[in-house]
Image (spheres, rainbow, N blue to C red):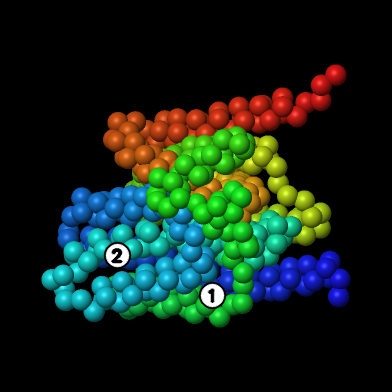
């Protein structure tokens, strides 16, 4: 067997194993989305305080942000597969502890659950994204990212759609145990897969030297690499601004939906996200098919254009267009969102394996920072301004930055005479 044949065989085995990983990750993601709804509702029913419920959400988001500081160092030094398995198992255990704990201690344990799930989600995200090129090969990462995103999109729809039914049927304890079972299924599935999640040179610095430990060192390592590849720093910056804009529609959609139909405030939100999810999945499957046929990747200009289109679609949503047009706009938002997710992840995965974990850790930190700041700012501004004004401003900033990036890249690529 030639070296080329061995490479093809490794790629085929990697994609076959990766499909099983996608299933497990989708089940874990289902647990995460179900967990978001159940935990927030349980917190409010337990404490009767909107403030404490908000603090719980803020703590989870803050933990995700802080975990991003150290995630790059962890996934670059430790076995990424073990990190993901440990993350799933830990999240399952803390949910079981919450269910078994006396009622008098559950309110306090909610904060522990928020910390563990916030940290676990970020660690798993960084470890998995940085592992994909090693599992399937660099030439298959577009297809792999599309498969992974499709699984998570389906899980999001299923998690949000089933949350109300499950909670009313089996109660909060039953929902938390289902969450725990989803995490344990993912851990067991991943543990049995014979996959490679890191390159042979991972864990060492330039020239084979050991990288310095510590959270600060992880950020410095990422920044040193990003300084040599400024296009990646620009992409991460746009992604952070995009997350900042996303906070506005996440906060603003319930407000808009209530204004459109006070009797059924969930109607528009449910319709929008269901349509968005369909567009998201369609985009992911189209990109996967295109990559399989052409073997090509997605460049930075395409990502920036997709980000601009996505933000523009969210702005149009808040103009409250007629139902047929609203469906079209929501579909476009989902298509653009799915496309940019694949494009962004694929581009960052082009980094060398010894740098990739640090880059994704830095990216997770930037995205969570943008989303967190956006959530706080939106909550404040929506008390004083209309949802359209807030969303138009936040997403308008993302559109502006994306178009500036497209123009800069076009000028740079223009042939000189």
In the displayed structure, 267 sits above or below 21; it is above
Q: Which residue is mark 2?
A: 113
Front residue of this view, candidates 266 and 378:
378
Front residue of this view, candidates 92 and 34:
92
Quarter of the image for residue 159 reads bottom left
In the displayed structure, 175 sits above or below 124; it is below
Q: Nearer the viewer, mark 2 or mark 1?
A: 1
* Mark 2 secondary-structure assignment: helix
Q: Which residue is mark 1?
A: 190
* Mark 1 secondary-structure assignment: helix
**Quick one: label 2, few (<14), some, or many (20+) residues within 10 Å?**
many
Residue 247 lies left or right of residue 351; in this view the side is left
Quarter of the image for residue 266 reads bottom left
Identify which residue is drawn at 50% across, 44% down.
221
**First reached walking from the N terminus: tag 2 or tag 1:** 2
Q: Position of residue 16 (x, y in %)?
A: 69, 74
Q: Is residue 7 visible?
A: yes
**Quick one: label 1, few (<14), some, or many (20+) residues within 10 Å?**
many
Give the numbered dot on residue 174: none
């Amino acid at each position: 067997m030639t070296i080329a044949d061995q490479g093809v065989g490794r790629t085929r085995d990697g994609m076959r194993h990766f499909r099983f990983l996608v299933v497990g990750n989708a089940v874990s993601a289902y647990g995460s989305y179900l967990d978001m709804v159940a935990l927030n509702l349980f917190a409010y029913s337990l404490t009767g305080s909107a403030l404490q419920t908000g603090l719980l959400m803020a703590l989870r988001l803050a933990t995700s942000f802080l975990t991003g500081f150290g995630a790059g160092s962890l996934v670059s030094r430790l076995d990424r597969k073990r990190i993901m398995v440990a993350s799933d198992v830990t999240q399952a255990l803390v949910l079981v502890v919450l269910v078994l704990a006396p009622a008098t201690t559950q309110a306090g344990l909610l904060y522990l659950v928020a910390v563990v799930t916030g940290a676990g989600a970020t660690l798993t995200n960084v470890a998995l994204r940085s592992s994909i090129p090693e599992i399937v090969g660099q030439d298959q990462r577009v297809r792999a990212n599309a498969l992974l995103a499709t699984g998570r999109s389906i899980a999001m729809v299923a998690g949000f759609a089933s949350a109300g039914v499950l909670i009313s049927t089996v109660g909060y304890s039953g929902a938390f145990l289902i969450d725990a079972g989803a995490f344990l299924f993912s851990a067991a599935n991943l543990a049995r897969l014979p996959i490679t999640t890191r390159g042979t040179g991972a864990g060492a610095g330039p020239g084979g030297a050991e990288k310095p430990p510590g959270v600060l060192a992880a950020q410095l390592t990422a920044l040193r690499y990003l300084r040599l590849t400024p296009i990646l720093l620009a992409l991460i910056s746009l992604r952070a601004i995009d997350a900042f804009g996303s906070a506005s529609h996440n906060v603003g959609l319930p407000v808009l939906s209530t204004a459109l139909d006070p009797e059924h405030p969930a109607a528009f939100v449910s319709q929008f996200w269901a349509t968005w999810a369909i567009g998201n999945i369609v985009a992911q499957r189209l990109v996967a098919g295109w990559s399989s046929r052409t073997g090509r990747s997605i460049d930075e200009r395409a990502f920036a254009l997709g980000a601009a289109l996505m933000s523009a679609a969210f702005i149009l949503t808040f103009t409250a267009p007629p139902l047929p047009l609203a469906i079209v706009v929501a579909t476009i938002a989902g298509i653009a969102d799915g496309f940019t997710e694949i494009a962004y992840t694929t581009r960052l995965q082009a980094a060398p394996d010894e740098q990739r974990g640090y880059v994704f850790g830095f990216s997770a930190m930037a995205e969570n920072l943008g989303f967190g700041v956006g959530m706080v700012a939106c909550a404040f501004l929506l008390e004083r301004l209309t949802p359209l004004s807030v969303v138009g401003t936040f997403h308008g900033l993302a559109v502006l930055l994306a178009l500036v990036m497209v123009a800069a890249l076009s000028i740079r690529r223009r042939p000189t005479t």
